[in-house]
Image: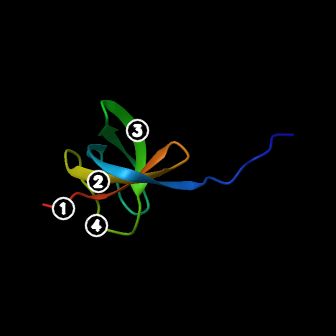
Amino acid sequence: MMMRFPKTIVFFEHQGLGTAVKAIAADQPGRVRFQATDWPAKLYRPTPMIDCDRKVRVVGREGLTLLVVPAEG
């Protein structure tokens, strides 16, 4: 029998910038390039959709999925 563990949210002390390589919407995960690697990503809090090539702020992770918000400015 396989045990499942709940995914824990971990917030990063030092947040970083990434770039969306696949659009991210409230109901649809996407992908971001962060620290020279592509990662699955989802919005940390409900915001408008993030289109490809837009900058994002990586605020944490849930499992191997990065949690992002739109980058300011």
Would residue 68 be found to the left or right of residue 10 on screen?
left
Residue drawn at point x = 87 percent, y = 40 percent: 1
Circle 4 residue: 48
Residue drawn at point x = 36 percent, y = 34 percent: 38
Q: CA distance from mark 3 to mark 1?
A: 21 Å
As drawn, the label of residue 57 is 2
**Quick one: SS at disc 1?**
loop
Q: Identity of the amino acid at label 2?
A: Arg
- Count residues near mark 2 (Cα–Cα under 10 Å), then give few for <14, some for 14-19, many for 20+: some
Q: Earlier in the sequence, mark 3 or mark 1?
A: 3
Regarding residue 29, the answer to whether it shows in the image is no
Q: Identity of the amino acid at label 4?
A: Pro
Query: Do callouts 1 and 2 mark residues in contact (Cβ within 8 Å)?
Result: yes
Circle 1 residue: 72
- Count residues near mark 4 (Cα–Cα under 10 Å), then give few for <14, some for 14-19, many for 20+: few
Q: Quadrant of residue 67?
A: bottom left
